[in-house]
Amino acid sequence: MSDRGHDWMDVDAGPVVRPYAVTGGRAKPAAGAFDLVAFVVRRVGPGEQHLLPEQRAILARTSEPVSVAELASHLDLALGVVRVLLGDLLQQGLIEMHEPEYDQSVGPLRPDDRILKAVVNGLRAL
């Protein structure tokens, strides 16, 4: 043990080993790719009693659709960790994932300019 406390703690970063321990050493999700802008929403299902605290936090945040990037931010977890945990939840049938539609030649399909302008005008009206 050093003067600052435990060797596995970093004063500025917090626990150093935690993300690795949370995912069981896995770096890739068991199911799904989980694009940053993919939406995740909770499904009601059995088997929620044997979840990690981080998985319970994910389920608490996904009662309404939320993006993968937002989840990582709200939970203060690394994106890779969130993707692995989401893969486990998807495999257990506890969440649904809605990936953005892609055109192989262009990338993600974007909404029509008219829709974007209507959204901007609506936001300005607020």
Image: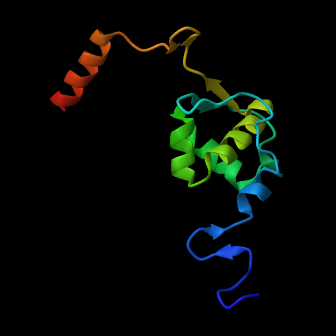
The total of numbered circles placed on residues is 0
Residue at the (75%, 33%) spot, across then down: 45
- Looking at the image, residue 125 sits to the left or right of residue 24; the answer is left
* Residue 30 % position (x, y): 81, 34
**The C terminus lies in quadrant:** top left
The single residue placed furthest to the left in the displayed view is 125
Q: Is residue 83 left or right of residue 108?
A: right
Q: Which sits in the foreground, 67 or 78?
A: 78
Work out which quarter of the rendered image holds the N terminus and state it: bottom right
Picture coordinates of residue 103, whole percent (x, y): 55, 9
Residue 70 percent across, percent down from the top left:
50, 41
Tell me: residue 39, above or below residue 17: above
Q: Nearer the viewer, residue 18 or 62?
A: 18
Picture residue at 74% right of the left edge, 37% below the top: 89
User: Looking at the image, which is closer to me, 122 or 38?
Assistant: 38
On screen, residue 70 above or below 15:
above
Q: Is residue 119 above or below residue 79?
A: above
Residue 69 in view? yes
| Image position of 72 (left or right of 8) | left
Q: Is residue 122 above or below residue 48?
A: above
* Residue in the image at 68% along x and 39% along y: 83
**Image position, residue 67 (x, y; %):** 53, 34
As drawn, is 112 to the left or to the right of 50?
Answer: left
Residue at image x 70%, y 66%? 16
Please identify the quarter of the rendering in which residue 19 is found.
bottom right
Q: Quadrant of residue 114?
A: top left
Q: Residue furthest front?
A: 105
Q: Is residue 64 visible?
A: no
- Most extreme residue toward the bottom, as rendered? 3
- The image quadrant that residue 119 belongs to is top left
